[in-house]
C-alpha cells in the first residue's frame, strides 16, 4: 500500500529524530527541566553592536553586557556598543525612513529591533550585516530577502532577462514573490528555532554534522536519478530547472529540521480502534457509493461526402444484421467504424451511467444484456452500433475493503490537526515584524486567526447561554441525580 504524504514525512524525519534524541536526551526533548519565558526562542544572547568605524579594531560585532548597559543609561554614564552609537535613540526616526522603502539594511534592522524591544540575532550570518537586505524579524532573527527568494532566485533572474524588466518592475516582482513565500518561511523558521532552542552548542554541532551526512547521501541519490557523474554537472542540471546546489542544500536542511520538529511534536496515535473506523464509515456512506458502470464496444458510422444519410443508415442496418448472425464485432469496428476507438476494435473502458453525450446510447447500455447488439442509434453526425461487454450495478464499497484507507485518513486528519495546533502555538508566542506592508501576509493571517477564535468563543458562549438546565445535565453526568 502506498504511503500517505504525512507518513513519508514522519519516515524522513525518523533518523534525524533518533540522532537528536541521542544528542539531547529524549527526556530533554520531551520536556526540559529548564523553563524559558518564551519557549519558542531561548534566552537572548548578549546584545550585539553594529559598530561604527573605530568602535572595534577588527570591524566585527561586539557583545554588550545588557545589565551594565541599562545601568549606564539610568545613571547617565557613557554606555557601550549599540547604545554608544546612539542608535537606540535614533530607532524611531530610522523606522520612519526605512520602512517605506521595503528593503531594510541589516544595520537599520538593528535599530528597528531595538525600537520594538527585540534583540537582533544574526546566528552566524554576520557577513550580511553591511549588505544584507532585511524584510523583517522573527523573534529577533532577520528575514533576509536573499534567503526568502533563494528557491526562486534563478527563475526570477531568467524571467527578468527574458522579459527585459526594468528595475522598478523587478523590485515589484520581488515584493510580490516575497508576499507569496513569507508565511511558510516564517512558520518553518519558527519550527527550526523551537528545535534548536532545546539543544546546547555541542549538540547543535552534532546535529549539523548529521545533516551534512544526510545531505551527501541525498546528493548521491539525486546525481544517480539525473544520471550525472560530478557535483558540478548536478549543479548545471539544477540550474536548468531554475535552482542550484546552494538553494538545494538550504532547502533540504530547513525541510529536514522542520519535519523533525513536526515529527517530534505531532506524533499521532499508533492505532485507530475499529469502533472509530466504523463510526467514520457509517457517517460517510455516500463517499463509498459508486454508480452503475459499463464496459462496451462501438461502431460509429459518420455521414460523409461520398456516403449520404440514407446510405449510412443502410450500412448501419446491414452491420447490425451481420453482428446478430455472429460476425466479429472487433473486426467490423476496425473495418468500418469512424469512432475514436476504431483501431482497438471499438472497445471503450468503463463508463458511468449518465456520462455519455448521446442519451439514447447511454440508456441502452444500461438496459441491454451483456453480449447483445444494440442499434443502430441515430445521432447528430451519423449512427452508432453498440455491444455491452460487462456491466457493474450501482452499489457501495464494503467496510472491509476500505477500512485500511479510513485508518490512514483518520491518522492524517489527526496529524494535520496537530500540525495546525503546533503552528498556531508557535505563531502566538512569536514576535514577528514585517517592515513592508506590501509583502506582509503574516499580519492579516494572524488577525484572521484571532477573528476566528473570537467568533468560536462567542458561538460557544451563545450556545452555553441557550442551553436549558436539562441540556447541561445531559452533558455533565456528574450533575445528574
Image (tube, rainbow, N blue to C red):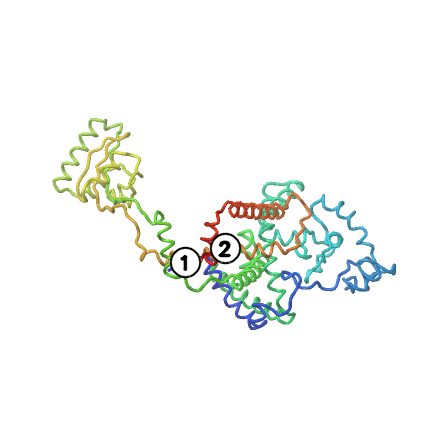
Up the image or down, 38 lies above or below 378; here it is below
Give the percent coordinates (x, y) of residue 228: 50, 61
Q: Quadrant of the N terminus?
A: bottom left
Who is closer to the viewer here, 207 or 119? Answer: 119
In the shown orientation, is residue 403 left or right of residue 21? left
The residue at which mark 1 appears reads as: 408
Disc 2 is placed on an element classified as helix
Residue shown at the point (68%, 55%) measured from the top left: 142
Q: Can residue 403 be seen by looking at this rendering?
A: yes
Decide: marks 2, 1 in contact (CB < 8 A)?
no
Which class describes the residues within 10 Å of circle 1: few (<14), some (14-19), or many (20+)?
some
Q: Earlier in the sequence, mark 2 or mark 1?
A: 1
Who is closer to the viewer here, 299 or 184? Answer: 184
Residue shown at the point (48%, 49%) measured from the top left: 469
The residue at which mark 2 appears reads as: 417
In the shown orientation, is residue 354 left or right of residue 246? left
Up the image or down, 250 lies above or below 93; here it is below
Residue shown at the point (79%, 64%) measured from the top left: 67
Q: Quadrant of the C terminus?
A: bottom left
Q: Nearer the viewer, mark 2 or mark 1?
A: 2
Residue farthest toward the front in the current orientation of the protein: 481
Which class describes the residues within 10 Å of circle 2: few (<14), some (14-19), or many (20+)?
some
In the shown orientation, is residue 328 left or right of residue 44? left
Give the percent coordinates (x, y) of residue 453: 57, 48
Q: Identify the image quadrant of residue 51.
A: bottom right
Q: Can residue 232 be seen by looking at this rendering?
A: no
Q: CA distance from mark 2 to mark 1?
A: 14 Å
Give the percent coordinates (x, y) of residue 176: 61, 44
Disc 1 is placed on an element classified as helix
Q: Identify the image quadrant of residue 318.
A: top left
Amino acid at each position: 500500500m502506498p504511503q500517505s504524504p504525512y507518513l513519508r514525512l514522519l519516515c524522513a524525519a525518523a533518523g534525524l529524530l533518533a540522532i537528536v534524541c541521542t544528542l539531547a536526551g529524549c527526556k530533554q526533548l520531551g520536556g526540559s527541566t529548564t523553563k524559558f519565558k518564551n519557549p519558542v526562542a531561548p534566552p537572548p544572547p548578549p546584545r550585539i553592536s553594529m559598530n561604527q568605524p573605530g568602535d572595534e579594531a577588527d570591524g566585527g560585532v561586539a557583545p554588550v553586557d545588557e545589565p551594565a548597559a541599562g545601568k549606564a543609561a539610568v545613571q547617565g554614564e557613557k554606555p557601550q556598543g549599540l547604545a554608544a552609537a546612539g542608535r537606540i535613540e535614533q530607532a524611531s526616526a530610522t523606522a520612519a525612513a526605512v520602512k517605506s522603502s521595503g528593503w531594510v539594511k541589516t544595520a537599520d534592522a538593528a535599530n528597528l529591533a531595538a525600537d520594538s524591544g527585540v534583540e537582533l540575532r544574526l546566528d552566524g550570518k554576520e557577513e550580511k550585516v553591511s549588505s544584507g537586505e532585511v524584510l523583517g524579524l522573527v523573534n529577533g532573527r532577520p528575514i533576509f530577502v536573499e534567503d526568502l527568494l533563494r528557491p526562486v532566485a534563478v527563475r526570477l533572474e531568467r524571467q527578468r532577462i527574458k522579459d527585459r524588466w526594468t528595475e522598478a518592475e523587478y523590485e515589484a516582482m520581488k515584493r510580490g514573490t516575497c508576499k507569496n513565500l513569507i508565511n511558510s518561511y516564517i512558520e518553518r523558521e519558527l519550527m527550526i528555532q523551537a528545535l534548536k532552542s532545546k539543544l546546547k552548542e555541542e549538540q547543535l554541532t552534532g546535529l549539523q554534522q548529521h545533516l551534512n551526512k544526510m545531505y551527501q547521501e541525498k546528493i548521491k541519490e539525486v546525481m544517480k536519478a539525473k544520471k550525472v557523474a560530478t557535483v558540478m554537472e548536478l549543479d548545471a542540471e539544477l540550474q536548468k530547472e531554475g535552482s542550484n546546489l546552494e538553494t538545494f542544500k538550504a532547502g533540504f536542511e530547513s525541510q529536514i529540521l522542520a519535519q523533525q520538529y513536526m515529527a517530534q511534536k505531532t506524533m499521532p496515535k499508533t492505532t485507530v480502534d475499529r469502533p472509530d473506523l466504523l463510526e467514520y464509515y457509517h457517517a460517510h456512506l455516500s463517499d463509498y457509493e459508486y454508480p452503475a458502470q459499463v464496459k462496451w464496444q462501438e461502431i460509429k458510422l459518420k455521414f460523409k461526402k461520398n456516403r449520404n444519410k440514407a446510405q449510412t443508415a443502410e450500412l448501419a442496418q446491414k452491420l447490425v444484421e451481420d453482428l446478430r448472425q455472429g460476425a466479429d464485432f472487433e473486426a467490423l469496428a476496425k473495418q468500418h467504424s469512424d469512432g475514436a476507438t476504431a483501431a482497438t476494435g471499438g472497445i471503450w473502458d468503463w463508463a458511468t451511467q449518465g456520462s455519455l453525450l448521446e442519451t439514447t446510447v447511454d440508456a441502452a447500455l444500461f438496459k441491454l444484456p451483456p453480449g447483445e447488439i444494440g442499434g443502430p442509434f441515430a445521432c447528430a453526425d451519423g449512427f452508432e452500433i453498440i455491444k455491452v461487454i460487462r456491466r457493474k450495478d450501482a452499489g457501495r464499497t464494503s467496510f472491509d475493503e476500505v477500512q485500511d484507507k479510513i485508518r490512514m485518513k483518520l491518522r492524517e486528519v489527526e496529524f494535520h490537526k496537530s500540525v495546525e495546533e503546533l503552528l498556531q502555538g508557535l505563531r502566538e508566542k512569536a514576535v514577528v515584524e514585517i517592515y513592508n506592508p506590501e509583502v506582509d501576509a503574516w499580519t492579516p493571517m494572524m488577525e484572521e486567526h484571532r477573528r476566528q477564535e473570537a467568533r468560536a468563543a462567542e458561538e460557544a458562549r451563545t450556545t452555553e447561554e441557550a442551553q436549558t438546565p436539562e441540556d447541561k445535565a445531559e452533558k455533565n453526568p456528574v450533575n445528574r441525580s
